[in-house]
Image (cartoon, rainbow, N blue to C red):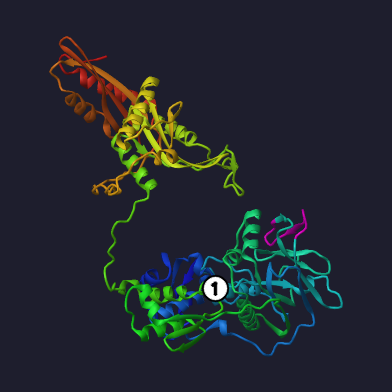
Amino acid sequence: MRISYNWLQTFFKEILPKPEKLADILTMHSFEIEGVSKHDDDTVFEVKTLANRAHDCFGHFGVAKEVSLLLKIPLERNPLLASSNAWLPSEKVVVHIEDSKLCRRYIGLMIENVKVGPSPEWLMKRLARLGQKSINNIVDATNLVMFEIGQPLHAFDFNKFSLKEGRAAIMVRCGEEHEKILTLGGGDHTVTKDMLLITDGDSGTPISIAGIKGGAVAEITTETKNIVIESANFDPVSIRKTAQKLGFRTEASVRFEHELSPELAYPAIVSVAQLILTIASGDETFVEGMVDEYPEPVEVLPVRVAFEEIGARIGTDIPKMEVERILRSLSSGFEQEGDDYVVTPPFERLDLIIKQDLIEEVGRIYGYEHVIPKKLLHVENIAVNPKALLASIIRSTLVDAGCIEVFTYVFQEHGVREVENPIADDKKYLRKDLGTGLSASLEQNTRNAPLLGLDTIRIFEIGNVFTEKGEKWLLGIGVKNVLKKKEKETTDLHALEKLLSEKLGCEVAGTLDGTVLEIDLDMLVSKVQFHKKERLPKAPAKKSTVYKKISPYPFIARDIAIFVPAQTKPETVLEIIKKEADDLVVMLRLFDIYRAEDKVSYAYSIVFQSKERTLTDIEITPLMEHIKGVLEKNEGWKVR
């Protein structure tokens, strides 16, 4: 989510800290600021808002409230307090909600005689900072309010309804099987029975996919004179499923998916009406009236918490005045009854339900960096989870034996447990074994073995599989010999099996399938006798590791063998090859020694690779000839 620094400043009379400083404060207490970028005279924050704060912080005002709390500075304006007592019930718009569980509230506001055109420069500029393209003053006004307080809005052309006796009927209902809707921008979508639609109540024509995208039927154009503004509240699960099935998400759907308070709909409609009356005013622009269908109004319940509980839970003493300041700032209603505080959360804070929520907020705003424990926690004789201990022992044993741990994909093309919402057509099932993933990993790593400087690939994985009988916990070990020696692969697997038996003090027997051995860990954990004082192995000391970027271009591997006098060391030959082979060599190693009378043959593997291009034989063959020529200049040296 993008947040404009200049937009935040509009909520305060006091000058905010510089953007970098403000980013640090918010990161420490509220949100992770993933990026800060300059845009002319403004700064834009990339804010990562977690799900528990999406209810109230998917807009600039939610972030401004956090800034007010953390910096202890008052808000200059609060759009959630917006109200209008002058509007009459609409005589030209009626609303019917088919299912109040899917649509909890629907407000329709009619404004007559608007003048549709370009937005003012300040409005276009403000939306552009967030990466939003200006459409027209009506649509831009609805978007601005959404980005300010988090409530999505939509505008319809009143005169494009099937008007009966001059009145537009809005029906909120589920779609019919194979029903189609043409959305704004030209997208043609087929809906199903579980998708919520906004329709023309008289003709039955869909005019919007509820909470996701408006339809082209009632689109606002420069010819529009009378409009109906929608401010509604929809079931988050319904919106999320519809967006997934249709294959697209919008700024509106993201907000509805995380659930919003139905109470947010009213201040949003007031804010957008005030803005439209200012920027789209015609000769006699006015609000004709409003209809508010709100079948089951929500009730915000107060939460009781004792002062002593707050300090005890957080683990430190927080000054009472600071606790009360924070709770007052958090609430829309605050009372003190003896040692208890009775706090009524603001309607938009759906995450404040129980006293533990309030305690967490006090600690977060006070700052966990200020928490000084009353006493250090001392824990003794905590039992180690046997499964965790077994996995740790196996992991350290196999790594010491030259194996590398891998993590293969849990979703596969074939299996017995199908996923309801697969992420891809070839990943519809949960894996039924570890062998499939390990075999693919062996093949991939074998192709890169020359680059890795390995003759044998040894990998393992510890993970769950899903069979017809249920979930199982397995260990899979895979071995692949680059030199095609099948008997060595089997020998290595049985050797590793024996090594684990010795380490664990019981027989370890698995099922061998080709080059992969699978061992049932659920069965093994019941056989292993752990000592009472046995603990998880200590993490090895940190080593300085330098990571290098892997070239995306293919490598070329060549071998060279040379007879040299018996007293010649292999390192001598290696240094000459390395010197003459240019900087294209990424791997050079000795892989075979053969002695015959007063001669010795050394065989080397050379791997060439470029970081800029794909190499060809035309480049490598002359280079190999050059290396051969340099080596044979030495007396008694002969390339085989």
Between residues 195 and 336, which one lies in front from this camera angle?
336
Image quadrant in which you'd find residue 241? bottom right
Locate residue 282: give its quadrant: bottom right
Position in image of residue 581 (x %, y %) = 26, 29
Residue shown at 63% from the left, 82% from the top? 270
In-front residue for pair 571/346: 346
Disc 1 crowd rating (10 Å Cα; few below 14, some 14-19, many 20+) is: some
Query: Which span of residues is magenta-colored?
Result: 175-187
Locate residue 210 relative to residue 35 in the image: left or right.
right
Q: Is residue 10 magenta?
A: no
Please name the amino acid that badge 1 sits on. Answer: Leu
Q: Is residue 258 above or below residue 484?
A: below
Q: Is residue 328 visible?
A: no
Task: Read off the residue under disc 1.
Answer: 350
**Residue 294: x %, y % from top left:** 70, 77
Residue drawn at 63 percent across, 79 percent down = 272
Up the image or down, 18 lies above or below 465; here it is below
In the displayed structure, would residue 510 be above or below residue 82? above
